[in-house]
Image (tube, rainbow, N blue to C red):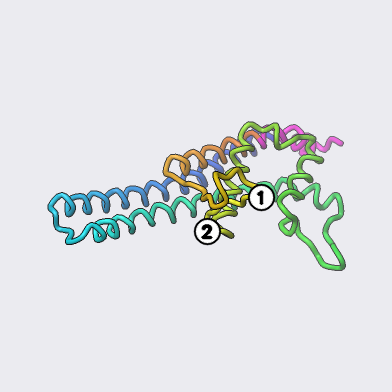
Amino acid sequence: MPFERRMGSLISLQIELNIIESFLKTVFEAADIEYSKIKVISDAREFSHYDDEANAYLIPLQWEEIAIKATLGELNAFIEWELCNLANKPFFEKGLTSKKGSFMMVHDLKFNEIIKLIEDYYKIKFVDLASYKQITILRNKVNSFKHRKGFKNPRKDDCNGIVDKNKISRKEAFRSIDSVGNFLKELWDETKQKKYEEDKGYK
Protein backbone atom coordinates (compact mmCIF):
# COMPACT_ATOMS: atom_id res chain seq x y z
CA MET A 1 0.00 0.00 0.00
CA PRO A 2 1.61 3.31 -1.07
CA PHE A 3 2.50 5.68 1.76
CA GLU A 4 -0.11 8.28 0.76
CA ARG A 5 -2.93 5.74 0.56
CA ARG A 6 -1.92 4.13 3.85
CA MET A 7 -1.82 7.51 5.61
CA GLY A 8 -5.20 8.40 4.16
CA SER A 9 -6.64 5.08 5.34
CA LEU A 10 -5.17 5.48 8.82
CA ILE A 11 -6.52 9.02 9.13
CA SER A 12 -9.99 7.92 8.00
CA LEU A 13 -9.86 4.99 10.41
CA GLN A 14 -8.94 7.21 13.33
CA ILE A 15 -11.69 9.70 12.49
CA GLU A 16 -14.29 6.90 12.42
CA LEU A 17 -13.10 5.45 15.72
CA ASN A 18 -12.87 8.89 17.37
CA ILE A 19 -16.51 9.59 16.47
CA ILE A 20 -17.60 6.29 18.05
CA GLU A 21 -15.52 7.00 21.15
CA SER A 22 -16.93 10.53 21.40
CA PHE A 23 -20.47 9.14 21.26
CA LEU A 24 -19.70 6.71 24.08
CA LYS A 25 -18.14 9.39 26.27
CA THR A 26 -21.12 11.70 25.73
CA VAL A 27 -23.59 9.05 26.84
CA PHE A 28 -21.46 8.05 29.83
CA GLU A 29 -21.11 11.68 30.93
CA ALA A 30 -24.88 12.14 30.72
CA ALA A 31 -25.38 8.95 32.73
CA ASP A 32 -22.89 10.10 35.39
CA ILE A 33 -24.77 13.40 35.77
CA GLU A 34 -28.00 11.46 36.25
CA TYR A 35 -26.36 9.14 38.81
CA SER A 36 -25.20 12.19 40.76
CA LYS A 37 -28.71 13.66 40.78
CA ILE A 38 -30.17 10.38 42.01
CA LYS A 39 -27.57 10.13 44.78
CA VAL A 40 -28.44 13.62 46.01
CA ILE A 41 -32.10 12.64 46.22
CA SER A 42 -31.16 9.37 47.92
CA ASP A 43 -28.88 11.06 50.47
CA ALA A 44 -31.72 13.46 51.27
CA ARG A 45 -33.96 10.43 51.86
CA GLU A 46 -36.51 11.76 49.40
CA PHE A 47 -37.31 8.38 47.85
CA SER A 48 -40.47 7.02 49.44
CA HIS A 49 -39.48 3.41 48.71
CA TYR A 50 -36.23 1.67 47.82
CA ASP A 51 -37.86 0.47 44.59
CA ASP A 52 -38.20 4.10 43.53
CA GLU A 53 -34.44 4.57 43.86
CA ALA A 54 -33.72 1.35 41.96
CA ASN A 55 -36.08 2.41 39.18
CA ALA A 56 -34.42 5.82 38.99
CA TYR A 57 -31.01 4.22 38.50
CA LEU A 58 -32.40 1.86 35.86
CA ILE A 59 -32.81 4.62 33.27
CA PRO A 60 -29.16 5.82 33.08
CA LEU A 61 -28.02 2.20 33.36
CA GLN A 62 -30.07 1.45 30.26
CA TRP A 63 -28.54 4.45 28.50
CA GLU A 64 -25.13 2.89 29.07
CA GLU A 65 -26.19 -0.56 27.93
CA ILE A 66 -27.82 0.73 24.75
CA ALA A 67 -24.77 2.89 23.96
CA ILE A 68 -22.35 0.00 24.48
CA LYS A 69 -24.41 -2.37 22.33
CA ALA A 70 -24.70 0.30 19.64
CA THR A 71 -20.93 0.81 19.77
CA LEU A 72 -20.18 -2.89 19.37
CA GLY A 73 -22.66 -3.08 16.50
CA GLU A 74 -21.11 -0.08 14.77
CA LEU A 75 -17.62 -1.53 15.17
CA ASN A 76 -18.80 -4.84 13.74
CA ALA A 77 -20.37 -3.11 10.73
CA PHE A 78 -17.14 -1.15 10.21
CA ILE A 79 -15.10 -4.36 10.19
CA GLU A 80 -17.44 -6.03 7.72
CA TRP A 81 -17.26 -3.03 5.40
CA GLU A 82 -13.47 -2.97 5.44
CA LEU A 83 -13.19 -6.71 4.85
CA CYS A 84 -15.63 -6.51 1.93
CA ASN A 85 -13.44 -3.81 0.41
CA LEU A 86 -10.38 -6.07 0.72
CA ALA A 87 -12.28 -9.03 -0.72
CA ASN A 88 -13.73 -7.11 -3.66
CA LYS A 89 -10.84 -7.68 -6.07
CA PRO A 90 -10.45 -11.43 -5.50
CA PHE A 91 -14.25 -11.73 -5.60
CA PHE A 92 -14.42 -10.36 -9.14
CA GLU A 93 -11.24 -12.13 -10.25
CA LYS A 94 -12.78 -15.46 -9.23
CA GLY A 95 -15.92 -14.66 -11.18
CA LEU A 96 -18.22 -15.07 -8.18
CA THR A 97 -20.70 -12.49 -9.41
CA SER A 98 -23.52 -14.93 -10.13
CA LYS A 99 -25.15 -17.83 -8.34
CA LYS A 100 -28.09 -19.79 -9.75
CA GLY A 101 -28.71 -17.03 -12.26
CA SER A 102 -28.74 -14.24 -9.66
CA PHE A 103 -26.33 -11.30 -9.69
CA MET A 104 -24.14 -11.20 -6.58
CA MET A 105 -21.99 -8.64 -4.81
CA VAL A 106 -19.21 -9.33 -2.36
CA HIS A 107 -21.53 -8.14 0.43
CA ASP A 108 -23.81 -11.10 -0.31
CA LEU A 109 -21.16 -13.55 0.88
CA LYS A 110 -21.07 -14.97 4.38
CA PHE A 111 -18.42 -13.60 6.73
CA ASN A 112 -16.31 -16.77 6.61
CA GLU A 113 -16.44 -16.75 2.80
CA ILE A 114 -15.14 -13.18 2.75
CA ILE A 115 -12.30 -14.14 5.09
CA LYS A 116 -11.43 -17.13 2.89
CA LEU A 117 -11.20 -14.90 -0.19
CA ILE A 118 -8.87 -12.49 1.59
CA GLU A 119 -6.71 -15.26 3.06
CA ASP A 120 -6.29 -17.04 -0.29
CA TYR A 121 -5.59 -13.86 -2.24
CA TYR A 122 -3.19 -12.20 0.18
CA LYS A 123 -1.66 -15.43 1.51
CA ILE A 124 -2.38 -14.64 5.14
CA LYS A 125 -4.20 -16.31 8.04
CA PHE A 126 -6.55 -14.25 10.20
CA VAL A 127 -5.82 -16.43 13.23
CA ASP A 128 -2.22 -15.23 13.04
CA LEU A 129 -3.28 -11.60 13.54
CA ALA A 130 -2.81 -10.55 17.16
CA SER A 131 -6.16 -8.74 17.47
CA TYR A 132 -8.32 -11.26 15.59
CA LYS A 133 -9.39 -13.14 18.73
CA GLN A 134 -10.83 -9.92 20.18
CA ILE A 135 -12.67 -9.28 16.91
CA THR A 136 -14.19 -12.76 17.08
CA ILE A 137 -15.35 -12.11 20.66
CA LEU A 138 -16.84 -8.77 19.59
CA ARG A 139 -18.75 -10.37 16.69
CA ASN A 140 -20.08 -13.16 18.90
CA LYS A 141 -21.38 -10.63 21.40
CA VAL A 142 -23.02 -8.53 18.70
CA ASN A 143 -24.78 -11.61 17.32
CA SER A 144 -25.89 -12.66 20.80
CA PHE A 145 -27.52 -9.27 21.42
CA LYS A 146 -29.03 -9.24 17.95
CA HIS A 147 -30.55 -12.71 18.07
CA ARG A 148 -30.70 -13.86 21.72
CA LYS A 149 -30.99 -10.75 23.93
CA GLY A 150 -27.34 -11.21 24.85
CA PHE A 151 -27.61 -14.82 26.00
CA LYS A 152 -24.77 -17.12 24.97
CA ASN A 153 -25.25 -20.13 22.73
CA PRO A 154 -24.50 -23.14 24.97
CA ARG A 155 -23.65 -25.25 21.91
CA LYS A 156 -20.96 -22.86 20.67
CA ASP A 157 -19.93 -20.47 23.43
CA ASP A 158 -17.98 -20.90 26.64
CA CYS A 159 -20.84 -20.85 29.14
CA ASN A 160 -21.24 -20.98 32.91
CA GLY A 161 -24.38 -23.07 32.79
CA ILE A 162 -27.21 -23.42 30.29
CA VAL A 163 -28.39 -19.84 30.85
CA ASP A 164 -25.44 -17.45 30.64
CA LYS A 165 -25.49 -13.89 29.36
CA ASN A 166 -22.71 -11.87 27.77
CA LYS A 167 -21.53 -9.08 30.04
CA ILE A 168 -20.68 -5.61 28.77
CA SER A 169 -18.94 -2.69 30.45
CA ARG A 170 -17.53 0.77 29.78
CA LYS A 171 -14.00 -0.61 29.90
CA GLU A 172 -14.78 -3.30 27.37
CA ALA A 173 -16.44 -0.81 25.02
CA PHE A 174 -13.36 1.41 24.88
CA ARG A 175 -11.10 -1.64 24.64
CA SER A 176 -13.16 -2.88 21.66
CA ILE A 177 -12.57 0.40 19.84
CA ASP A 178 -8.82 -0.04 20.31
CA SER A 179 -9.00 -3.69 19.22
CA VAL A 180 -10.73 -2.80 15.95
CA GLY A 181 -8.15 -0.11 15.22
CA ASN A 182 -5.28 -2.49 15.93
CA PHE A 183 -6.85 -5.28 13.90
CA LEU A 184 -7.38 -3.17 10.78
CA LYS A 185 -3.89 -1.64 10.98
CA GLU A 186 -2.38 -5.09 11.27
CA LEU A 187 -4.51 -6.41 8.43
CA TRP A 188 -3.50 -3.53 6.17
CA ASP A 189 0.16 -4.15 7.01
CA GLU A 190 -0.23 -7.80 6.05
CA THR A 191 -1.85 -6.96 2.70
CA LYS A 192 0.07 -3.82 1.71
CA GLN A 193 2.79 -5.63 -0.30
CA LYS A 194 0.20 -7.24 -2.54
CA LYS A 195 -1.54 -3.88 -2.99
CA TYR A 196 1.78 -2.21 -3.78
CA GLU A 197 2.50 -4.77 -6.50
CA GLU A 198 -0.95 -4.24 -7.98
CA ASP A 199 -0.46 -0.46 -8.05
CA LYS A 200 2.85 -0.90 -9.84
CA GLY A 201 1.36 -3.31 -12.34
CA TYR A 202 3.38 -6.31 -11.14
CA LYS A 203 1.99 -9.81 -11.58
The image shows residue 96 at horizontal and vertical percentages of 84, 56
Asked which secondary structure carries label 2, the reply is: loop
List x then y, in percent, for residue 123. Answer: 79, 35
* Amino acid at the residue labelled 2: Lys
- Residue in front for this viewpoint, 65 or 85: 65
Residue at the extreme bottom of the image, as rendered? 101
Which residues lie in the magenta part? 187-203
**Nearest-to-viewer mark from 1 and 2:** 1
In the image, farthest residue toward the left: 44
Pinpoint residue 47: horizontal percent, then vertical percent: 18, 59
Q: The residue under label 1 is which amino acid type?
A: Arg
Front position in the image: 6 or 71: 71
Residue 149 marker: 2
User: Mostly what secondary structure, the magenta segment?
Assistant: helix
**What is the C-alpha distance between the residues marked 1 and 2?**
16 Å
Q: Which mark is residue 155?
A: 1
The quadrant in which the C terminus is found is top right
Res 59 quadrant in image: bottom left
